[in-house]
Every structure is written in structure tokens, then in C-alpha cells.
Amino acid sequence: MTAITVPSVRIGKAAVGALGTLAVATGALESVVTPTLPLLQRELDMSPAEGALLSIVLLITGALVTPIAGRLGDRYGGKRVLVRLMAVVSAGGLVSALAPNLPVLLIGQVLQGAMVGALPLSFILVREHLPEEASKVAIGVVGGLFVGGGMAGTLSAGPVAEGLSRHWMFALPTIAVIAATMLVNGLMPHDRPVRSDHAGVDWPGLVLLSGTLGTLMLVLALAPEIGDRPLVLGALVVLLAGFATGWTAAERRSASPMVDLRMLARPAVWKSSVLTFVICVGTSVAVYLVPQLFAVPSGAYGFGAGATEIGLYLLPGAVAASLAGPISGIGVRRFGSRAVVTAGVVVMAAALIALAAAHSEVWHLVIGKMMIAFANGLCVTAMVTSTATSVGRGDTGIATGLVLVTRVIGFAVGAQLGGALLTAGTPSGSDVPAESAFVTGFVIAGAVTALSLPVARTMSKEDDHE
């Protein structure tokens, strides 16, 4: 394996803006299923198990595609792979928009899952065409806009599905993805590959990782329903352990692994991956619980909010998440990743514990959700930035892909944990969970988030410039 050093063409704000627009569009398309899952279950006559499958299939595909996309981007050039990846995503969005039934919708979601690989490819382009200090800010901007796009999709999906149809909630962001991809293709200069190896795709690693992630999501999704059948749950756990062990062994033997475990051993990479996973678990529990608490009937202890009201209540969080990316990029440049991540963890843990103690007014939840969204954006962007700038240019896509895979898995685990807590806390014969289930969820999320603080404190300035 040899590195190729080539002069790069500097890009302006328009090209970075095109990448940011694409991040917003893909973030929106990624997030439309979760808030509209009850509506989709009714219209497509889905069982709870089928609904769980629909909610996780995009995450599984994204976790698989991300490291491959990063590796191919390092090898063949970020723009070339990004444009082709977005063609797959656009096809998936159109299939989802036109889907008459669940099987076709699942196919569309599988294709859409490729969108998660767009971020590491965008980071490859930013590092190739901008000076190091400017690239940190640009990475923060693009990452923050992806988060903001996800929140925008969450806010708009319900009103669009109810006011137009479920087809349009997929079609509108897909049209935006197509337009943004055309902008990127026209404004972003071609980058040359920085790796000269031509090893094939690690198919054994891909298959085994697919089995690992798929089984993990099944265990998390089905645990509340099969908890009284320990043999079934035990068999799934054994299967999960087998897939994980086989995948680890395959990656160690592979000449060109899809996930380079040796890179994962680097301090900056493993610390960022662990922190991203833990922080996203804590964040995702809150992301799931807050809208559910808004929707609890006002006659109980909730607010009886509908989809439109919930969207308005979540709007400050969407704004905070969008601002967190660029602020984090500037903070990393001035103070370092450790300071930014530590501040974000402290803010998030405090907000979660505060929600456990005080959630009797709408503004309690609005402010708490806003702080959590802002803190998560600070942390994840800082860790991605630290990882991207701690490795050689030829490893940017692979390294950031590792962090983004842990982000996806963390959010999936947190959401399923939140759902399991509410399921377990719902009295027999009632549709309303006990208030204590929400309190327990916020406390657990705060404790999990706080556990990341010791790891964050071990981050050193050298992690930013290994």
C-alpha cells in the first residue's frame, strides 16, 4: 500500500455549501420513518414485529455501508464514490415513495441506508480541498447540518404524511437529495485517490457484520416481547456472540478488512468510537422519550400534544442541533477536542437528570431537549473532527466511518432501550406508561452519559494531531 501525494484544488463557500445542502437533505430523508411509524403501521397493516423491522433496517444498512464507502472513497476519490452512492439513495427514496406495501418499502429503506456513508465521503472532500484549520470548521458545519436535517425531517414528516400522504414524506426529501447531488457534482472539483491498493471488498467481513448487526437489532427490538421465553432470547444472544466472534476473526485475517481493527486500536479512534456510542445511547433514550411524554394524555401527567404541536415543541432542539456543529468545529480549533467533548457531556448529563426531576411543564421538556440536542452535536462533531484530523489523509474515510458506525448503533440501542422501558412500565390493560418509567429512562440516560466523562478526560492534545 502506498500513498499518492497530489496537489489539490481549493474550494470556496459554494462547494462547502453544496455539501451542507446534501447533508441537510440526507439527514431529513433518514429521519422520516421514526415519527410516522404508527401511521405507517396503520396504513400498511403491519404487526409490531414488522414495524420494529422497518424502524431498524435503514440503520443496519447504514452501519454496513459506511465503512465500505469510506474505504472506497479513500481508494477511488470521495466525489466519484459520493455521487454514485447518492444515486443509490435517490433510487431508494423513490422506491419508498412509490411503495404500495411493506416488502417494497423495505427494499426502498435498504437502498436509502446507503446515505449514512455520505458523511465520511464529505469529510474526505473537505480535507482534500481545504487547509487543516478551515477543514475542521467545515467538517463541523457539514456534520451539524446533517443533524439539523434529521431534526427537520422528524418535524415535517408527520404534517406532510397527514396533510398530503405518506408517499410525499419520502418524495420531497428525495427530490432535495437529487438536487443537492447535482450541485455537489457541479461545484466540487474531482479529487484524486490517495490510496493505490486495489484489494477487493471484504465479503466475509460484510456478511458476518450484517449478521452481527441484524441479530443485535432483533435482540433489542424483540426483548420486551420474548422476555418470558428465555430459551428464545438465549438462542439469539448465542447467535449474536457467534456472529461477532466470527466477524472479529475474519477481520483480523483479511488483507483488506472492511473495518480495520488495527486502526480502531489507535487512541484517538477508539476513544472517539466509545464516546460516540455511549453519548448517542444516552441521547437516543431522550430523543425517544420526550415526544412520547408530550403525547401522554393531559388527564394523566402528560400534555396530550398532537403531531403538529410536538413538532413545534421540538423546533428549538432542531435549531440547537444545527448550530452545534459549526460551534463545535470552532471550539475544537481553539480549545481542542477534549474541552469541547467534556463540556458537552456535562451539559447533556445535567439536562437528562434535570428532566427526570422536572417535567411537569412544556418548557421543561423544550429546554431540556434543546440542551441535549446541542450537547450531542458538540460531542459527536468534536469526536468526528478529532478522528478525521488525527489520521493520514488516506485513512480519513475509514476512520470517520468507524465513528459514524458507532453513532448509528448507539442511536439504535438507545431507542430500543427507551421503548423497552416504556413497555415494561405500562400497566396491564392500559395504553399509558407509568410516569416512573419516564423518570427511570431519563436517569439511566443521564448515568450512561456521565460514564463517558472519564474517557473524555483521557483525551489529550496529541489525539488531535497523532
Image (tube, rainbow, N blue to C red):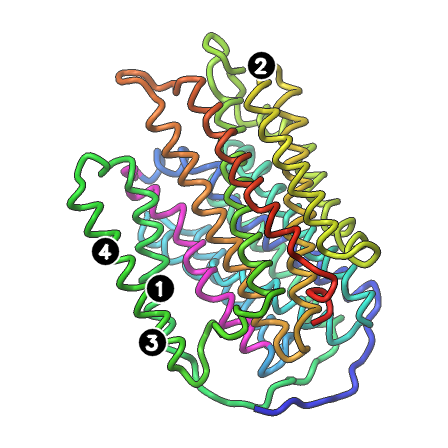
Q: Is residue 68 magenta?
A: yes
Instruction: Kindly tell me whether residue 24 is visible in this rendering.
Output: no
Circle 3 Cα neighbour tier, 10 Å, few/some/many (<14 / 14–19 / ≥20) = some
Lateral position of residue 117 relative to residue 335, left or right: left
Q: Which mark's residue is nearer the viewer, 1 or 4? A: 4
Asked whether disc 1 touches disc 4, contact meaning CB atoms under 8 Å apart, the reply is no
Callout 1 secondary element: helix
Above/below status of 53 relative to 36: below
* Disc 2/disc 3 C-alpha distance (Å): 51 Å
Name the disc covering residue 360, or none: 2
Mark with earlier residue (3, 1): 3
**The N terminus lies in quadrant:** bottom right
Residue beneath label 1, please? 210
Name the one closer to the observer, 16 or 274: 274
Q: Residue at x 15, y 45 (%)?
A: 231
Residue beneath label 4, please? 238
Three-letter code for the amino acid on which mark 3 is drawn: Pro
Residue furthest out toward the top:
299
Name the disc covering residue 204, or none: 3
Q: Which residues are magenta?
A: 45-73
* Disc 4/disc 2 C-alpha distance (Å): 43 Å
Asked whether disc 4 touches disc 2, contact meaning CB atoms under 8 Å apart, the reply is no
Q: Quadrant of residue 373?
A: top right
* Disc 3/disc 4 C-alpha distance (Å): 20 Å
